[in-house]
Image (tube, rainbow, N blue to C red):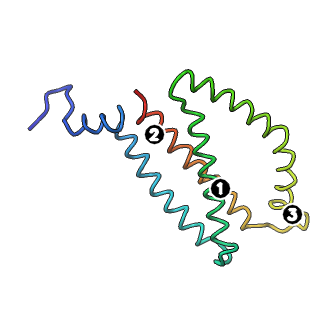
Amino acid sequence: MQQPYGTQPTWHQKLQRHLGSNPGTVILATLFFLVFAYVIWDLTSTLSTDNSPSSGAALNRLIALLGGLLGWALGILFAPFSAAEKEQFQGIAKVISAFVAGYLLSKAEVFFQLTLFPKDGSFPLMNWIRVGIFTASMLLGALTVFVHRLYAFRE
């Protein structure tokens, strides 16, 4: 049965009731999250140099988890639900940015210099792979939470 022009089928209305005004965006974001999470999970073991519990895949997965959790927090910060939440997040962001700019970057510079740019001229491929895993996980977490907060859970 064909719907009159301008009306939505009942299945679309049900999806909107459960997933917000843009259910297609939410469903696609969730599907992409699942696909990319699987790819990252698979890469954490495939790209490890050794599969012992003390290093290799376990360390890669820890790095992916930390990146995903940081991305989750960033996704929440960038998509506040209300003006009050936005104001609260801006206060939190100021404190975090002061800490990151003042203390963490000064310590991180030495860490990055030693691990990513060693003085002996070697190229630490595994360290760069772990930077990629962390960055991909962070972006995946941030984008997924941002899209869901922006489209699925707003009134």
Q: Quadrant of the N terminus?
A: top left
Q: Is residue 108 left or right of residue 83?
A: right
- The residue under the point 30% across, 34% down is 17
- The residue under the point 39% across, 40% down is 25
Residue at the disc numbered 3: 118
Measure how far apart labels 1 and 3 are at the Cα level: 20 Å
How crowded pointer 1 is (Cα within 10 Å; few <14, some 14-19, many 20+) is rated as many
Observer-nearest residue: 116 or 88? 88
Q: Quadrant of the C terminus?
A: top left
| Amino acid type for the residue under numbered disc 1 | Phe
| Amino acid type for the residue under numbered disc 3 | Pro
Observer-nearest residue: 128 or 85? 85
The image quarter containing residue 64 is bottom right
Observer-nearest residue: 112 or 80? 80
Residue at the disc numbered 1: 134
Secondary element at tag 3: loop
Measure how far apart labels 2 and 1 are at the Cα level: 21 Å
How crowded pointer 2 is (Cα within 10 Å; few <14, some 14-19, many 20+) is rated as many
- The residue under the point 55% across, 49% down is 140
Residue at the disc numbered 2: 148
Observer-nearest residue: 53 or 9? 53
| Amino acid type for the residue under numbered disc 2 | His
User: Residue 6, relative to residue 103: is it above or below?
Assistant: above
Secondary element at tag 1: helix
Mark in the foreground, 2 or 3 = 2
Q: Is residue 40 left or right of residue 13?
A: right
Decide which of tag 1 and tag 3 comes sooner along the chain: 3
User: Residue 60, relative to residue 12: is it above or below?
Assistant: below
x and y percentages locating residue 128 in the rendered image: 72, 61
